[in-house]
């Protein structure tokens, strides 16, 4: 008895109003706990209280496809079939958006084509948010105007097949509906009025312009072009000079940086080669310079003594007696001989200090190498 349609209800589209919902969905609604507990014994007056408690919309959800409370209330309205005035009041209710959506959904199922367009199209101006439960149980954020557009344009909504309705332009051609009036039409009219006023001002300005002398206007226009060209040329020359000076400074800085980098690289190379020479030669450089000086002085004295012997041999061959030496020459000879003996002693001392004259040949060879490296000789 609880699932029967009201005996006084009229048939909708030639069938029982509850048959607008598919049998599978209708059976699930009848088995739902919300339908059995909350929707039992509801009337058109008490249905409003349950509609005010809604917090989301949707069809069926979950693995076993449970119906939402929104679908249960839609089914109850199809069962009791409230009067048209009550449904219109639901739609015009601005305080509770889910009550408005419930009335719009019921009217889309049971109303005529002209009534659907007449009462649902004004809801395009309602931009409030709605919570819609998806088939997987998750919630989706939508808006009132989006849901109304779905009711008017889609074939399915909330798992229910929507009855077909005629296109709006067909109803306008028949005369069942007036052309739709947009809510922004008043604003468009205001904008058109402002444009008309601006056009009037432009026409008056053109009249004033026609009353002027053409020769005077031509001269004024020519002078304005001349001054504008002169200002443009002056600005162009100023910008060109500024850019050229800036480029010259940039080139000068680049040359200065290049010279500085070149000098830095040259000094770095010089320091690198000097350090390499010091590491390679070590302390042998001073010893090498001393030895070079000694060899030069020795060769000089040897050449001097050789020249002296050659001169004495020439005198003997020609039968000349050597000329008596002077006292100063004797002193020079003695001084040279003393230098030679001193050099010999120094050489012998150096040989002794170097350890190269050691009786053991291995130690003598090691001392030679240590002398080249600038190390002290081995004394054993």
Image: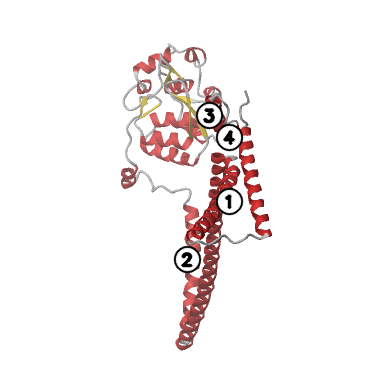
Label disc, if present, on residue 371 of the rendered structure:
4
| Residue 110 appears in the rendering | no
- Compared to residue 169, the image places residue 330 above or below, namely below
Which residue is tagged 2? Answer: 196
Q: CA distance from mark 1 to mark 4?
A: 22 Å
Q: Are marks 2 and 1 in contact (CB under 8 Å)?
A: no
The answer to whether residue 91 is left or right of residue 374 is: left
Q: CA distance from mark 4 to mark 3?
A: 10 Å
Q: Quick one: label 3 or label 1, which is nearer the N terminus?
A: 1
Q: Which mark is residue 297?
A: 1
Q: Quick one: label 1, few (<14), some, or many (20+) residues within 10 Å?
A: few
> In the image, is 44 to the left or to the right of 4?
right
Mark 3 sits on what residue? 365
Q: Residue at x 50, y 61 (%)?
A: 319
Labels 2 and 3: the sequence-earlier one: 2
Observer-nearest residue: 218 or 285? 285
Which of pointers 1 and 4 lies earlier in the amino acid sequence?
1
Q: Which dot marks residue 12?
A: none
Helix, strand or loop at mark 2: helix
Q: Are marks 2 and 4 in contact (CB under 8 Å)?
A: no
Q: Circle 3 sits in a helix, a strand or a loop, which is it?
A: helix
What whole-number distance in Å separates the C-alpha atoms at marks 2 and 1? 119 Å
């Amino acid at each position: 008895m609880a699932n029967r349609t009201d005996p006084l209800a009229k048939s909708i589209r030639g069938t029982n109003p509850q048959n607008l919902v598919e049998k599978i969905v209708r059976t699930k609604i009848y088995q739902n706990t919300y339908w059995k507990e909350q929707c039992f014994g509801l009337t058109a007056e008490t249905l409003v209280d349950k509609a005010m408690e809604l917090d989301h919309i949707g069809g069926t959800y979950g693995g076993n496809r449970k119906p939402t409370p929104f679908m249960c209330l839609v089914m109850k309205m199809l069962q009791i079939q409230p009067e048209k005035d009550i449904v219109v009041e639901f739609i015009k209710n601005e305080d509770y958006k889910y009550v408005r959506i419930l009335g719009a959904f019921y009217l889309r199922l049971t109303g005529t084509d002209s009534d659907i367009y007449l009462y649902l199209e004004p809801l395009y101006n309602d931009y409030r948010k709605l919570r819609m439960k998806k088939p997987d149980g998750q919630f989706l954020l939508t808006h009132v105007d989006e849901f109304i557009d779905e009711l008017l344009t889609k074939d399915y909504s909330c798992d229910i097949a929507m009855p077909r309705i005629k296109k709006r332009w067909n109803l306008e051609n028949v005369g069942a509906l007036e052309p739709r009036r947009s809510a922004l039409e008043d604003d468009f009219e205001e904008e058109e009025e402002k444009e008309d006023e601006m056009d009037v001002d432009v026409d008056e300005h053109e009249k004033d312009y026609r009353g002027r002398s053409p020769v005077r206007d031509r001269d004024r226009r020519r002078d304005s072009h001349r001054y504008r060209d002169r200002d443009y040329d002056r600005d162009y020359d100023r910008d060109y000079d500024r850019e050229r000076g800036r480029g010259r400074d940039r080139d000068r800085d680049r040359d200065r940086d290049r010279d500085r980098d070149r000098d830095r690289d040259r000094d770095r190379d010089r320091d690198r080669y000097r350090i390499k020479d010091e590491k390679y030669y070590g302390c042998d450089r001073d010893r090498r310079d001393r030895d070079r000086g000694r060899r030069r002085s020795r060769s000089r004295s040897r050449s001097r003594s050789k020249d002296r012997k050659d001169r004495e041999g020439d005198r003997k061959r020609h039968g000349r007696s050597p000329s008596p030496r002077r006292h100063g020459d004797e002193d020079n000879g003695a001084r040279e001989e003393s230098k030679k003996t001193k050099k010999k002693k120094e050489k012998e001392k150096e040989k002794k200090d170097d350890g190269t004259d050691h009786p053991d040949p291995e130690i003598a060879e090691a001392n030679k190498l240590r002398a080249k490296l600038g190390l002290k000789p081995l004394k054993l």
